[in-house]
C-alpha cells in the first residue's frame, strides 16, 4: 500500500466542525454529536489512505 497522504485541517474547518458538533449536542445529545465528530475524522482518515476516492472537482481539477 502507498504511503498515506497528510490531511491538514485548517482552523476555519475545525471551527465549523466544533460549531456543528455543538449544535448537534444541543439538539440531539452528546452521544450523537460525538458520533458525528468521530465519523468526520474516520472519513478523513479514509481519504488520507485512498486519496483517489470521490469525484473530481469541476472547479479545481486536482481536487476530489
Image (tube, grey):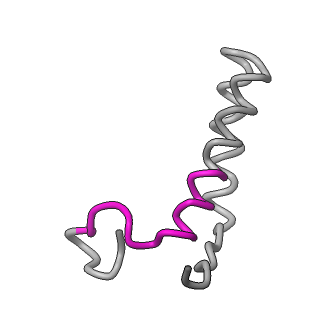
Magenta highlight range: 41-57
Question: In the rendering, at what x and y percent does residue 35 appear?
Answer: 69, 32
Residue at 36% across / 74% down in the picture?
63
Task: Identify which residue, 31 or 22, lies in the foreground.
Answer: 31
* Camera-nearest residue between 48 and 9: 48
12 vs 31, left or right, is left
- The residue lying at 71 percent from left, 29 percent from top is 33
The quadrant of the picture occupied by the N terminus is bottom right
Along the viewing direction, whichever of 1 and 9 lies nearer the viewer? 1
Residue at far front of view: 1
Q: Is residue 46 magenta?
A: yes
Residue at 69% across, 52% down: 15
| Rendering quarter of residue 9 | bottom right
Q: In which quadrant of the rendered image does the C terminus lie?
A: bottom left
Q: Residue furthest right?
A: 30
Residue at left offset 66%, top offset 27% = 23
16 on left or right of 60: right
> Quick one: which residue is furthest to the top in this view?
28
Residue 17 percent coordinates (x, y): 65, 47
Horizontal and vertical percent position of residue 34: 75, 33
Residue 3 at x, y = what percent? 61, 84
Amino acid at each position: 500500500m502507498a504511503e498515506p497522504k497528510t490531511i491538514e485541517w485548517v482552523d476555519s474547518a475545525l471551527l465549523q466542525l466544533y460549531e456543528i458538533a455543538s449544535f448537534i449536542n444541543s439538539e440531539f445529545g452528546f452521544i450523537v454529536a460525538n458520533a458525528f465528530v468521530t465519523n468526520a475524522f474516520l472519513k478523513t482518515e479514509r481519504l488520507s489512505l485512498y486519496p483517489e476516492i470521490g469525484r473530481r472537482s469541476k472547479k479545481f481539477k486536482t481536487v476530489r
